[in-house]
Amino acid sequence: MSNEPSSTPNAEGQRPAVERGGLWGLFFSTAGLLLPPYGMLLSIFGIAQGRRARKAAKANNAQAPGALLSMILGGIGVLFSLLVILGQWMFWDEYSEYQQCTARAHTEISQTECDTAFEKQVVERYPMLEGQLPANLTP
């Protein structure tokens, strides 16, 4: 994760200098999209690492492959994490009731009743979702 270029600036017959921090930023941003519990933190790391790599590459007249993409994916990861947090906040009561119901459900029929009750509660709270929910909506 060093921000030092891997080789000296481009001279005749030498490889161009490359800043490797952008690839680490890309790794963090991708992990932020794939690991929802840690998505916000990893995406922010990806954005910061991509930004650092671009600055270091500019200062050393080098390339920073993946730096811009890591910042874009990090931004998408932050937005996705915010949407997940917003959804959990909006449906907290319904989801808590659903968890309690499923903990008490010992048969498949009672589990199906819990699923149906959850769907009904969501539609009652947000009528605009009527007909928009998937056939088997289970958190």
Image (cartoon, grey):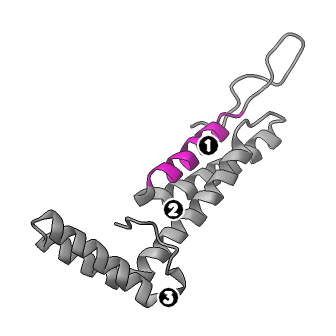
Q: What SS does tag 1 mark? A: helix
Residue 116 x, y percent position in the rendering:
30, 76
Residue 43 is drawn in which quadrant?
bottom right
The secondary structure that dominates the magenta segment is: helix
Residue 40: give its label: 2
Range of magenta residues: 19-35
Question: Residue at point 19% right, 77% down?
Answer: 100
Residue 26: give its label: 1
Question: In the picture provided, is 59 more to the left or to the right than 48?
Answer: right
Q: Residue furthest right?
A: 12
The answer to whether residue 77 is above or below residue 99 is: above
Residue 67 x, y percent position in the rendering:
70, 43
Q: Quick one: label 3, few (<14), some, or many (20+) residues within 10 Å?
A: few
108, 92: nearer the viewer: 108
Residue 114: give its label: none
Cα–Cα gap, marks 1 and 3: 40 Å
Question: In the picture provided, is 123 more to the left or to the right than 50?
Answer: left
Q: Earlier in the sequence, mark 3 or mark 2?
A: 2
Question: Residue at point 82% right, 25% down?
Answer: 9
User: Which residue type does callout 3 highlight?
Assistant: Pro
110, 68: nearer the viewer: 110
Dots 2 and 1: beta carbons under 8 Å?
A: no
Q: Earlier in the sequence, mark 2 or mark 1?
A: 1
> Dot 3 corresponds to which residue?
127
